[in-house]
Image (cartoon, grey):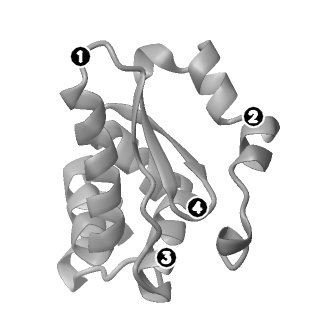
């Protein structure tokens, strides 16, 4: 299961009455490691005026944290909620390299390079093959 959903939130979801802030808070509480990684990448972007992206590239400390990150970024709803919350576009490589792109950079050369097959292949190493 990706998220630990409180009963009250689940009841509101069943009635179709969940706002984005409630959803994102559920993600933050359920996937704290993934939240930390995305927050760090978004903060690095914010800390560099004019930067196209900020990234987090430290491998997760355990398989549990790796699983959190994969669940967060593999779910369209969770990933989309994180992107809306932080005002960014996420890009992801090798089970740990997460980039937060400025929305204005999406579609640009740097973004296209980051998400390209060539960049994915260049970012391979034997240490990362277990992810």
The residue pinned by badge 3 equals: 66
Residue 64 against residue 44 in the figure, above or below: below
Q: Identify the secondary structure beneath mark 3.
A: helix
Question: Mark 4 or mark 3: which is in front?
Answer: 3
Element marked by disc 4 = helix
Can you tell which mark lies on residue 74? 4
Few, some or many residues within 10 Å of mark 1 (<14, 14–19, 20+): few
Give the residue number, with chain letter if any, for mark 1.
Answer: 49
Q: Indicate the quadrant where residue 31 lies.
A: bottom left
Residue 98 at x, y = what percent?
48, 50
Report how far apart the C-alphas of labels 1 and 2 lie in the structure: 25 Å
Q: Residue 116 carries which label?
A: 2
Residue 44 placement (x, y as % from top left): 27, 37
- Of the image marks 2 and 3, the number of the one nearer the N terminus: 3
Reply above or below: 77 against 120. below
Considering only order in the chain, which callout, 3 or 1, is on the residue closer to the N terminus?
Answer: 1
Mark 4 and mark 3: span between their CA atoms?
Answer: 12 Å
Looking at the image, is 109 positioned above or below residue 21? Answer: above
Res 44 visible: yes
Whether residue 114 is situated above or below residue 108 in the rendered picture: below
- Across and down, in percent, residue 127 comes to 66, 73
Q: Determine the CA span between mark 1 and mark 4.
A: 29 Å
Label 2 and label 4: CA atoms lie apart by 18 Å
Q: Residues within 10 Å of mark 3 (few under 14, many from 20)?
A: some
Question: Toward the viewer: 123 or 20?
Answer: 123
């Amino acid at each position: 299961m990706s998220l630990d959903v409180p009963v009250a939130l689940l009841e509101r979801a069943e009635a179709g009455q969940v706002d984005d802030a409630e959803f994102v808070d559920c993600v933050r509480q359920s996937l704290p490691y993934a939240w930390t990684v995305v927050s760090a990448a978004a903060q690095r972007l914010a800390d560099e005026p004019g930067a196209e992206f900020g990234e987090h590239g430290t491998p997760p400390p355990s398989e549990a944290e790796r699983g959190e990150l994969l669940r967060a970024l593999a779910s369209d709803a969770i990933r989309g909620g994180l992107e809306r919350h932080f005002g960014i576009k996420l890009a992801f490589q090798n089970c740990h390299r997460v980039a937060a792109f400025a929305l204005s950079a999406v579609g640009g050369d740097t973004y296209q390079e980051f998400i390209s097959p060539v960049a994915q292949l260049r970012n391979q190493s034997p240490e990362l093959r277990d992810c």
